[in-house]
Image (cartoon, helix red, strand yellow):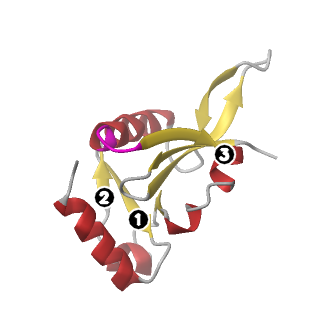
Amino acid sequence: MSFQGHLVCHTCKLKLTLGKLIRDDDGKQVGFGHAKLTDDELGRVTLAFLAVHIKHELVAMGDDALYVLEKLPEFDSLVIAPPGSPFALSHTPIVYAGVALWRLPCEPIVDREKRIQDTQRDPT
């Protein structure tokens, strides 16, 4: 079973999955491998995500900590959507460092839109 890393913004209720934890031959943790982003894209997206959310309640965590997070069902996930998919065509992406990502909602769209608007009004 793979172990993944995540960046979680509690302020925006948004999660960026970094991918599978990669270890070298000695078992030392050396990075992450994302199934849909190249190493370069993952690095750029991660740095951009950190920059956007740096003044928020932002944490890095692994699967173990993430899955026991009581409020996890309230968090949207940033995902790659196939370019011609109905979801990609009907939602506006967030672009981090030139890479388009979509917020996969964890709640009804109406509630989500209100929450996102409230967050954007108060970008602390």
Q: Where is residue 85 drawn, in percent x and y? A: 44, 76
Residue at figure coordinates x 36%, y 37% from the top left = 50
Q: Where is residue 79 drawn, in percent x and y? A: 48, 59
Residue at figure coordinates x 28%, y 46% from the top left = 98
Q: Where is residue 55 drawn, in percent x and y? A: 29, 39
- Secondary element at image label 1: strand
- Give the residue number, with chain letter if any, for mark 1: 103
Residue at figure coordinates x 17%, y 62% from the top left = 121
Residue at figure coordinates x 44%, y 83% from the top left = 108
Give yes or no for residue 13 being in the magenta stretch: no
Identify residue type, mark 1: Arg
- Give the residue number, with chain letter if any, for mark 3: 65
2 or 1: tag closer to the N-terminus = 2
- Give the residue number, with chain letter if any, for mark 2: 94
Q: Residue furthest left?
A: 121
Residue contact at pointers 3 and 2, CB within 8 angstroms? no
* Mark in the foreground, 3 or 2: 3
Residue contact at pointers 2 and 1, CB within 8 angstroms? yes
